[in-house]
Amino acid sequence: MTITLRNTLAAVTAMGVLTAMAFTVAPSQPAAAQSVKLKKIRTATSISPQERQQGDQYHPQLMAEFGGAYTGPQANYVTRVGQGIAVQSGLSGARSDFTVTLLNSPVNNAFAIPGGYVYVTRQLLGLMNDEAELAGVLGHEVGHVAARHSKRRQDAATRNTILGVLGTVLGGAIGDSGGLLGGLGGLLENSSMQIAQAATLGFSRGQELEADQLGAQYLVKAGYDPAALASMLASLANQTALDARVAGRDSRSLPAWASTHPDPASRVQRAAAVARQINGTRGGNRNAAAFLAAIDGTLYGDDPEQGVIEGNEFLHPDLKLRFAVPAGFGMQNGATAVTIAGSNGQAQFTLAPYAGDMNAYVDAAFRKLGGQTRIPYGEVRRTTINGLPAAFANARVNTQSGQIDIAVFAYEFARDRAYHFVALAPAGQLRGFDPMFASVRRMTDGEARGVRPRRLDVITVGRGDSMASLAQRMAYTTYQAERFQVLNGLPANAVLTPGQKVKIIVYGAR
């Protein structure tokens, strides 16, 4: 969450159209048993002026929602690879017609929008292990555009707003078919949470598989190994499962928002089978050495300037604030809000204009949440939380999913600066958020100085090094071995070879 306020507080915390599900898929999982028949997919042959105009319109908004562009040599490398794979789509023969952006986002995400705009986050980049995987991910996203999948989705989406684009290019947001947020329906009109609801719509099962096939075809045309898309999908599924374990969620459960997508095991197998069908056993370039050299030093995880998530705590060294979420809840840090999600509720932590009147501030939060529908809430009560003046109010609303309780809990940090939670839970279950409401406090100067960024460090395996010994160097206190394994796409029983290049995550200087 950055200091800057924007009119659209979008809670887009999607995994992207390269949707991953919460299951573990071994990188070495055999796929030989599956055979596929390649589908003839009708694709566009050019970028129309209308698509170019649409992309030009929404590119700045997408950049704002995903933390802006990540700059430096890594960005130049991603642009070169992305333009190289995008021209294989036939949408244009000119590399310059494609704008490929590396986003400064800690979310595993990649997407493309009409008009030649292609995006990948630095977090997803760090999960990759070679250039072919990067090209495969971006080729998959370009495949969605070439097959006009987003146009089919946009016909049913909200028009003339960012939802019309974001809802078509993003899939698999935190939630359960919109979860409690989705159940609120019209109450979310014009609110930041409506975008999170729209983002859960995702591409269809068939569209995802079409994009996988197109991505593999583009890889072959560019000289890459098409099997790279399958290995990337496996890493993404494993990372999603690990994220669920770290957050205390059941990594075996398949959220309903993923029900229209192939499960990760079958999708990995199918992607591998498609690669064999297209390319036989010829293989292709992976360019691992060049890739690892290019991404060395990339920021990993949260950017301290936007706040960081450490375990169950959110810390913002510049805003000098911190809070903790209950066990079983996960957090996603966005450009303008922190989204909290668990099986018993969802919440956002954000800021809004404040002129010293806490009652008016709470009222404005309910008005924004309700949009054109007025949410009747109870008395605004005052309290003090860790020395901070605070105010809160609750509401109960009837939805298609039953009764939902809503709380707005606000904190004054200065006479002109306040922050607040909007929390939603099934009727009678809001008390599960009480520890979170009570945890907000100021950070000390020493605590703020102690918040450091994490970075990717590409190292050479030495004699005597093992997965266990290198995992101990990871800049985490929990799940070090699992993080190292997933980061490098390694099976649990992998034996490292001296001279081999691997990635670890280390602390860097601000």
Image (cartoon, rainbow, N blue to C red):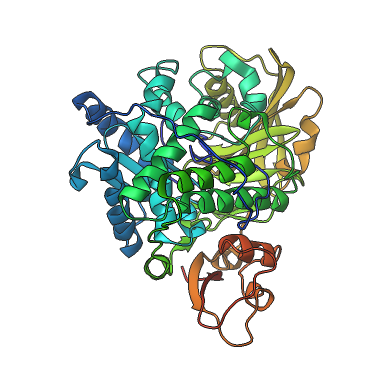
Drawn side of residue 493 relative to residue 66, left or right = right
Look at the picture and state if 79 lies above or below 342. below
Q: Quadrant of residue 380?
A: top right
Look at the picture and state if 358 lies above or below 389. above
Most extreme residue toward the bottom is: 463
Estimate the x, y position of residue 293 in percent, counting from the top left: 39, 71
Estimate the x, y position of residue 441 in percent, counting from the top left: 66, 51
Front residue of 284/118: it is 284
Residue 170 in view of the camera: no
Front residue of 29/480: it is 29
Residue 134 in view of the camera: yes
Q: Residue at x 72, y 45 (%)?
A: 251
Front residue of 444/58: it is 58
Drawn side of residue 27 relative to residue 501, left or right = right
Estimate the x, y position of residue 457 in percent, counting from the top left: 49, 72
Q: Quadrant of residue 185?
A: top right
Q: Residue at x 52, y 37 (%)?
A: 36
Q: Count all numbered tags in the image, as a single digit.
A: 0
Estimate the x, y position of residue 156 in percent, counting from the top left: 45, 15
Drawn side of residue 114 relative to residue 439, left or right = left
Q: Residue at x 79, y 36 (%)?
A: 432
